[in-house]
Image (cartoon, rainbow, N blue to C red):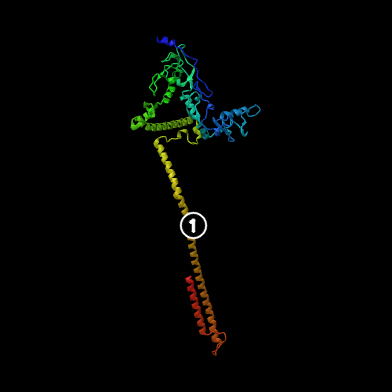
Amino acid sequence: MEEQDTSKARYNDTITITDYASSFNLIDNDSTPDLRNLKYKTNTDHLNCPICQQPFITPLTTICGHTFCKECILEFVKSLRNGTTSNDHAGHCPLDRTPIDPVNTNDLFPTPLIVTNLVDDLKVYCLNSERGCDWSGSRWEVDHHVTEQCPYTGVKCGGCRYDDSKYCELLVERRYLKDIEANECVHKLFKCEFCDSELTKIDENEHLEQECLYNFKTCELCGNDSIPQKNMAKHQDNCLKMGKVKCPAHEIGCRWVGSNETSLEIHLQNGNCQLNQFLPFYTSMNERMTSLESENEFLQRQLHKILDSIIQGKVTNLGYNEGLEEINKYSGEADQDKLIYLNFELDRLKFEINEKLIPFMNRSKISDQEKMIKNLVNDNFMMREDMNLQRMMINSLRKQLQFMLFSRNRGGVAAGLSGGLGNGTTMPGTLHSDDFATDLYELESRSSSEERFNLKL
């Protein structure tokens, strides 16, 4: 009986997915999103390619310093080949006509990683935003989002068709495949549980929310349980216009509904509504949870970005001299703490050098100058002592010379007195013995006084 029912199953293949210019469909494993169809949330003028006037995609930099998208610059150089040049790869920069050879890595090379990261971090909308996806994030996350997560990405149904034993190849949005059984085609027709309309999984929600007249719901304001869901919003607006009010804690479960503001005040006074007292804590916890979720999503995005960089080989542009296995080898928490501690100690030692050693070096320079001045003063004293000693020796020689001269004069005078005048008279100009003794005494006294004076010096 079951086989008979499946053989009579009917399908509605007229329902097709809505395609827009920027929409993405995951037809096979090789399908990749076209980043040129993205809509950006932020200004991108400073990161636009001069050729396509869109944010860089796989940017390359020329030898003259200009940056272009890889596809743009290669297509431009290719368009210059007219068969007349000797070098088929020759070209020039579109901005300043500097000769470049795209095959030569010195003429055309990958842009520094910091520029690529700036472009990849630009905020964009989902490619399926026109289908209803409200996701937004960094550009480098788009690929993972539309291929793995986005509920509006077009994928093949893959359900089994019992009429011809084939699998459905029609494209549907991923969200329709969420709650169906394995190998079931979403194009299979079935009857609505409230009316006799024939539906598929694709148009079921739209029928229940906007078309079905027997999908009754209960109004939370007036308690009426015979309001079709398609008319519920208009009905609740009428209830509010009639003076119906809800408790502020309605969002966390309070079902109280009143007819005026006075009844609401009575409901809230003296702590009658415990849910309303809990509402501030709930709001605070909800904000903290939202903050933690956003932080967790940010960390996950950073992790995915690092993994993508490693897989794509971008880590080679980070400036590490070690091999890939040597980078971040301190993976454990304890090793990371040790590394942080070593960096802290290094900074502390640098600070101590700047605070203590450099002033000490400056002071040592001053002390060297003072020492040099003291040495010069000491040398000056020694030179003065040597000069005094030389003066004493000169005075001593002067004394000896005077004594020798005096001895000669004394001998000559004595001979003249004895042989020249025998009558006892004195010749003019001759010296008496008393005068000679007086002169000798004055000479000795003068010499001794000069010697004492020199010794004092």
Q: Nearer the viewer, residue 35 or 189?
A: 189
Q: Residue 39, relative to residue 335: is it above or below?
A: above
Q: Nearer the viewer, residue 52 or 414?
A: 52
Direction bottom: furthest residue:
423
Relative to 332, is 39 on the left or the right?
Answer: right
Q: Nearer the viewer, residue 176 or 398?
A: 176
Q: Amino acid at mark 1?
A: Gln
Q: Residue 140, relative to residue 419: is it above or below?
A: above
Tag 1: Cα neighbours inside 10 Å, few (<14), some, or many (≥20)?
few
Residue 338 visible, this angle: yes
Q: How many marks?
A: 1
Task: Tell me the quadrant of the picture where the N terminus can be found.
Answer: top left
Quadrant position of residue 429: bottom right
Q: Position of residue 266 (x, y in %)?
A: 35, 30
Q: Position of residue 20 (x, y in %)?
A: 53, 22
Identify the secondary structure beneath mark 1: helix
Q: Residue at x 46, y 25 (%)?
A: 149
Residue 110 visible, this angle: no
Q: Position of residue 237 (x, y in %)?
A: 43, 24
Q: Residue at x 49, y 78 (%)?
A: 445
Residue occupied by mark 1: 369
Q: Position of residue 289 (x, y in %)?
A: 40, 31
Relative to 401, is 259 on the left or the right?
Answer: left
Q: Residue 4, relative to residue 37: is it above or below?
A: above
